[in-house]
Image (spheres, helix red, strand yellow):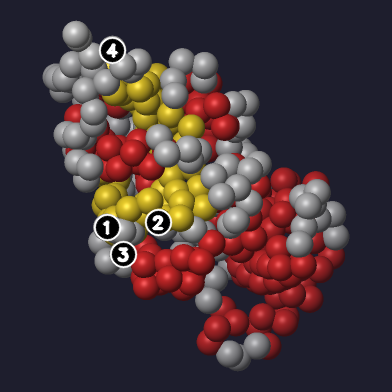
Amino acid sequence: MMPPETDPTRVAIVIPYFQREPGILRRAVESILAQQVPPSATLRVLVIDDASPLPAETELAGLKTTPGITLEIVRQTNAGPGGARNRGLEMAEGNVDFIAFLDSDDIWLPTHLADALEALDKGYDFYCCDNSRDGSFARFSEDVALLNDQGRALAGRATTLDPEGPVLGFPPHALDDEFVTDYLSHTSTVVLRASRIKGLRFDTDLRNASEDRMFWLTVALSGAPVAISWRCNVSCGKGVNVFFSAYDWNEPATLERIGCQLLFAKKLMRMPVMTPRRAAFARDRARTTRRAYSFIFLRTLMRGRKPPLASFWRLLRQDPSLPVRMPFLFIAVLADRRPEARKF
């Protein structure tokens, strides 16, 4: 007797793309082609060319896919990482079982998707794993206190799905506060059950920072069971990155990053369900980012340069008193001689 046929597992992979150097995107897509997935899995790779100076079609010309993998490229007017991912979500919705995210300057190790699907098949809706970033950290879990020591601090709330890694499974709402107060999952490590995020989109107000964090915490707060793996299955590379490249006070992108982080905090403060821990985090984040934003904004003006205003207008809708408070916050930062007071 022939074994019953298994329904295919349909996975969409969303890649927002904006790069200036050749070879970066091709490396990312080649890491998808090298995935060791079950024979029943089909992969739909959606490259959203966000008006990249180096077109995706040029980068991927001549690249041969393998059976079970399709590649689609869509070029659009620049909308930022969140807007590009939203386009991918719209294309995938209703046609796939799982949605994975990969930034164009990152790569997956060959077992990434197989590990994710194995965990998700045990009844989980949200999966993420450990990752490395050259020049920043060897393991993301060592950089986040909550994830240190293979998640020992969290083990009491979890089921061990696999001791190798380990891979831990958390019931709905077990990590709600932690998803709000900590950044637990880099985008390229996340794989989600498509039905859990139906209709959900990245917040495009948060164009330069925190749009991914807001998405993940929204999924967690919706009651998604979460699986976290300490297997380091993702390697983060170096390319155009609106967050990690925005730390020079003289660069407009830095002000936009901090502005989006302030906007994130203000939006958190308006969420309908706020525990004392979440509320305290949101207030503290709003206070520190408001000081930083005010200082760099007025510093830019005093140097005779026009600051970027995209995040400023969005902030005014959430914080109308900001312009009045900015001079006082600037003076407060200027008078504070502690080194940590200016770690923006």
Which residue is under mark 1? 164
Instruction: Name which residue lies at 38% across and 42% down.
Output: 119
- Which of 21 and 23 lies nearest the eye of the viewer? 23
The label shown at residue 4 is 4
Which of pointers 4 and 3 lies earlier in the amino acid sequence? 4
Alpha carbon distance from label 2 to label 4: 30 Å
Q: Are marks 1 and 2 in contact (CB under 8 Å)?
A: no
In this picture, residue 97 sits left or right of residue 318: left
Q: Position of residue 180 (x, y in %)?
A: 62, 58
How would you rate the neighbour count of disc 3 (Cα within 10 Å): few for under 14, some for 14-19, many for 20 or more? some
Label 2 neighbour load within 10 Å: few <14, some 14-19, many 20+: some
| CA separation in Å, label 4 and label 3 | 41 Å
Amino acid residing under circle 1: Glu
Q: How many marks?
A: 4
Comparing marks 4 and 1, which lies closer to the viewer? Answer: 4
Residue 167, can we see it? yes
The residue carrying pointer 4 sits among few (fewer than 14), some (14 to 19) or many (20 or more) residues within 10 Å by Cα, namely few
315 vs 103, left or right, is right
Q: CA distance from mark 1 to mark 2?
A: 10 Å
The quarter holding residue 167 reads bottom left
**Could you tell me which secondary element the residue under label 4 belongs to?**
loop
